[in-house]
Amino acid sequence: MNELPHMRKLYTRSVLSEETAGSDPLKLFSLWFSEAKEEGEPEPNAMSLATVDKTGQPSVRIVLLKGLIRDEFQFFTNYDSDKGRDIAENHLVALGFFWPKLERQIRIEGRAKRISKEESESYFAIRPRESQIGALTSNQSSVVPSREFLEEKFASLTKEWEGKEIPKPENWGGYSVFPTKIEFWQGRVGRLHDRISFERFESGWKRSRLSP
């Protein structure tokens, strides 16, 4: 671990100006996301999701963005998971995207809520069958006795539902995050990174440049 103080990368790929940022952060997000896909970023829709429990303890994990619907960021999970319980107690969350090839990251703050049962069912129906069985198998975040326990349960459910349509579990579905703040970060030389932040007000989005 002695090499950690000396590990660094020189950021020279691009710049972020007020002109290129524009006035609509959701349009800029869509543009950056498209460029991340074109660049071949591995899993460009992978995002950090930070939540806070009722004691004030923050927690973060990687989930997958599965839609930008009605200008809200959508993901799916088990409602009884740690993140689901956190959101039930505190709907304020944060999202983070990092695309190293493009030397970019995006930070999002907002409010999370469950989407409709119908929307969740529509998405569940297009998931791979193994993922559907996995949702039935896992009581997410709960303690299990062994890996073998999960694999045996998975095999049993696979056999039970063979040839049948698999219903969405009642405790599984989607959340949407209504963004109230979005910050775009572009790596620059000398660690003088470009940081442009958009904050939502009743009158619309206010854009600001932040010191790196």
Image: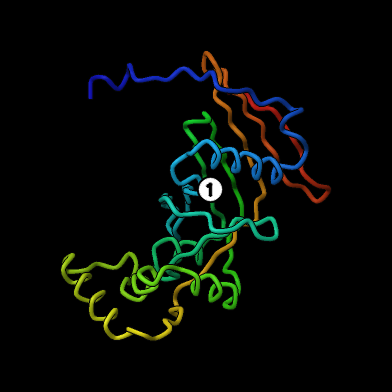
- x, y percentage for residue 210? 65, 27
**Residue sitting nearer the eye, 135 or 199:** 135
Three-letter amino acid code of the residue under disc 1: Leu
Location of the C terminus by quadrant is top right
**Residue placed furthest toward the front:** 163
Residue 89 shown left or right of residue 139 in the figure:
right
At label 1, counting other C-alpha atoms closer than 10 Å, the crowd grade (few under 14, some 14-19, many 20 or more) is many
Q: Position of residue 189 (x, y in %)?
A: 54, 15
Residue sitting at the far top? 190
Q: Is residue 168 left or right of residue 34?
A: left
Toward which corner of the image does residue 107 lie, by quadrant?
top right
Q: Residue at x 32, y 71 (%)?
A: 138
Q: Quadrant of the N terminus?
A: top left
Q: Residue at x 39, y 62 (%)?
A: 82
Q: Which residue is label 1 attached to?
A: 95
**Image position, residue 124 (x, y; %):** 49, 72
The quarter of the picture where residue 22 lies is: top right
Residue 68 to residue 27: above or below: below
Local secondary structure at mark 1? strand
Residue 175, compared with residue 2, is above or below; it is: below
